[in-house]
Image: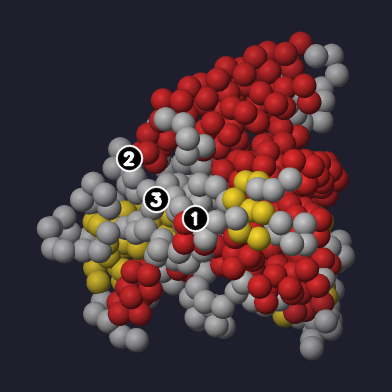
Amino acid sequence: MSAVRIVADTGRCIGAGQCVLTAADLFDQDENGIVELLTDGVVSGDDVARVREAEHLCPAAALTVAPDTDGTTGPPGQQGA
Amino acid sequence: MSHPSAVGLTNGTEPLPDFPQLRQCPYQPPPGYRELRENQGPVVRARLYDGRPTWVVLGHAQARELLIDPRLSSDWSRPDFPSPSPRRKAIQKATILVGMDPPEHSAYRRRLISAFSVRRTRELSVSIQRRADELVEAMLEKGPPADILGGLALPLSSHTICRILGVPYEDHDYFEEQSALLVSPQVTEDDATQALMNLRTYLTTLVDRKEKEAEPGDGLLDTLVSEDLADGSLSRDDVIRLGIILLMAGHETTASMITLSTFTLLQNPAQLAVFRADPGKAALAVEELLRYLSIGDVAMRIAAADITVGDVTIREGDSVMLSTSEINRDPAAFEDADVLDLERGARHHLGFGYGVHQCIGQNLARAEMESALTTLFTRIPGLRLAVPAEQVEIKPAQSGVQGIYELPVAW
């Protein structure tokens, strides 16, 4: 499975913690309870299914998972095409 | 399934089904909802107690789509905001947070979420487990029969709210007693109102006390007093009302889930065996119970603009109600949806709602259910109902929270 890029919109986050319950190695909550990415935002392999689940479960639609534009890893938080 | 497209609600007198309807079994949705979904589709018309027509959402995908749509408003201060019952209407007048839209809602919610984070919940789960142990121990010492609601579920949820808010330990008994009066079937409406006033008075005094403390404690009220009240970003009344809404939202709901889960597992011996076989899977089981029981069955909204969902057009000003229990039995979202399957993996259920109002205490509720149910069924292997199942009395449809009045058990 090809790599995907996660974008977390901290402005939309409501701190439900569903992403942390889905993948505690990829997501955390900061001291204000707001989502934090524990990676550079690019994941591949088995992690793809887990971030897609987190995207689906987020009640605030604060996570977006998009195909990573062929291995060019820029700073996280930029929407891929 | 095709049905004619529908546009807006008329205030006519054509016969429409009632909403909400009564559960015939404590852990099954009202049968009428199923007929509506199968005959008319995932979004149907019904009529509220006051004669007002309403849309009722019964489909999982449609509920997700609508609950995240900013055009669907939760603002209870709108004079035409719909209500499913007279009692809910009374509560709607005196609240904060729940009946608000962003950005006002977001400003309040953001002050609370760190107290309900996954990490903070894990810290609290130690004390939740300890309290569950104490309560089950007390049941064993006293001997059968026991009432799960009064003996375990209510005191555990009250204890947890005390911990999260930062109610001093020496006040727990008073707090638990008054909280229980709010939802006890044996008390009159006046007694419940009095209990709410007592809790409000207590919280007011507590906020005063916390203002005078040199070192804030680790409760949410401590944080709100030492930070938000101190810098003027929240008023004293805001802090007290946040305490009240968290109490009201977290007390009866969790207690009802623990009680109804116990009843449901006792009625499903094969699934109870699954639950007992592997305590490591308790989290998975709790998720399925949340889906299956869906006790917060009525979500209320009003359309702030025209919204099209499937082939239905909801008009601005229309009432929109959502039945969580039927949504969580939608075959498009859950295979064999009417089957209790503790190992299915039901995390996409909408038992805690969806969108910006999704239950803020959901992770605490999960921790309380896990502790209560694993402790109960591990410590009391021979647990059984002390009365015939059909004698277990169901709360009326107009209640904000589905559930049963008591659950007598023996062993």
Q: Secondary structure at mark 3?
A: loop
Disc 1 sits on a residue from what chain? Answer: B
Q: CA distance from mark 1 to mark 3?
A: 13 Å
Compared across the picture, whether B64 is left or right of B283 comes to left
Tell me if residue A20 comes above or below residue B83 in the rendering. Answer: below
Disc 3 sits on a residue from what chain? Answer: B
Mark carried by residue B86: 2
Q: Quadrant of the N terminus of chain B?
A: bottom left
Tell me if residue B183 comes above or below residue B348 in the rendering. Answer: above
Tell me if residue B183 comes above or below residue B342 in the rendering. Answer: above
State the residue position of label 1: B392
The picture places residue B136, in percent across and down from the top left corner, at: 77, 47
Residue B114: quarter of image = top right
The residue depicted at 26 percent of the width and 49 percent of the height is: B49
* Relative depth, front residue between A1 and B58: B58
* Relative depth, front residue between B14 and B368: B368
